[in-house]
Image (cartoon, rainbow, N blue to C red):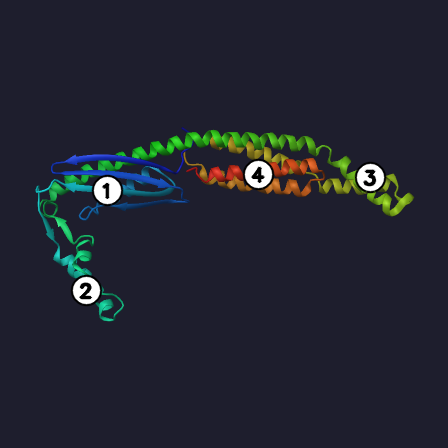
Amino acid sequence: MALSGMTGFGRAEGALGAWSWAVEARSVNGRNLEVRFRGPPGFEGLERAARDGAQARFQRGQLTVGLQAKRVEGAGAVRLNLEQLERYLAAGAPYVASGQAAAPGLDGLLNLRGVIEAADAVEDPEAHAALEAAMALSIGAALDGLAAARTEEGAALDGVLGGLVNRIGALTEKSSSLAEGQPAIIKARFQKRLTDLAGEAATEERILQEAAAMAVKADVQEELDRLAGHVDAARNLLATEGGVGRKLDFLTQEFMREANTLCSKSASGALTAVGLDLKATIEQFREQVQNVE
């Protein structure tokens, strides 16, 4: 699949010994790749697995990877990490003493990361390492599910963007046809204006000279050629594997630049109308491109 979107969801579950868990990975649009990991106390090391897994699969998007784990009731004990608790208390003591913060309650302290730990996770490093390895596999599976969802979105975007590019191409061709009449329109307009002002002094030679100079300034062939080239470039990008969102976004700016110049140089209402339609279509294209990785 050529295109990938930036929104999606993936989920995976797992179990090992007395533990069971579920991993959810979701993403939304983003200019760069940002990864946030949320997991239970004692499993902070899995944040690296989430970040490395995301970087291996994605180029852009704001990702959130959440891990929820639970232990069979009565299967093991937990312990209070007094050293970690003392660190939190020492860090907050100056603020409490100055009146900037209230003294912390026990329920709040116990919810701080690292204060309560699973006893076996601390006392049996090998068992904890095996548990983290199994959870890391589930993180990878959830990210694979997210990648599949983003690919599905990309397939839908491919059809929409392809249709908009075709319309931009058709409007460019229509503009080219209408632009052929620009010199005659400019000549007739200038001839009427000059005749109204100068009367019989407005010679045909003078009219042709001035109209030719104005026609050169109003020539839109260069803009039309660039628009046609951008259409070909967009089609090539849509058929390219990998993340092309940034390139399509830049191409959209170039599309709009040429369309604006086309409208400003237009000498007829018909060409202006097509130019405005072209700008509206480019804006629709821009909005959809924001969803492409």
Residue type (three-letter) at the residue carrying disc 2: Ala
* Label 2 secondary element: helix
For image coordinates 55% across by 29% down, the residue present is: 166
Classify mark 4: helix, strand or loop.
helix
Residue furthest out toward the bottom: 98
Q: Which residue is mark 2?
A: 90
Residue 210, relative to residue 228: is it above or below? below
Q: Nearer the viewer, residue 97 or 228?
A: 97
Amino acid type shown at disc 1: Leu
Left or right: 80 with respect to 274?
A: left
Residue hosting label 1 = 67
Residue 162 drawn at (x, y percent): 50, 30
The Cα–Cα distance between marks 4 and 1, rounded to whole angstroms, is: 44 Å
Q: Does the image show residue 241?
A: no
Task: Choose top left, top right, bottom left or bottom right for residue 24.
Answer: top left
How many marks can you see? Answer: 4
Which label lies toward us, 3 or 4?
4
Q: Amino acid at mark 4?
A: Ala
Whether tag 2 and tag 4 are in contact, CB under 8 A, the answer is: no
Residue 152 percent across, percent down from the top left: 38, 30
In this view of the protein, which residue sits in the foreground, 282 or 235? 282
Name the residue carrying label 3.
208
User: Disc 1 and disc 2: Cα gap in Å?
Assistant: 30 Å
Q: Position of residue 271 (x, y in %)?
A: 68, 36
Answer with left or right where residue 187 lies relative to residue 11.
right
**Badge 3, how many Cα within 10 Å: few under 14, some, many 20+?**
some
Residue 156 sits in which quadrant? Answer: top left
Mark 4 = which residue?
Answer: 280
Residue depicted at x 75% and y 42%: 214
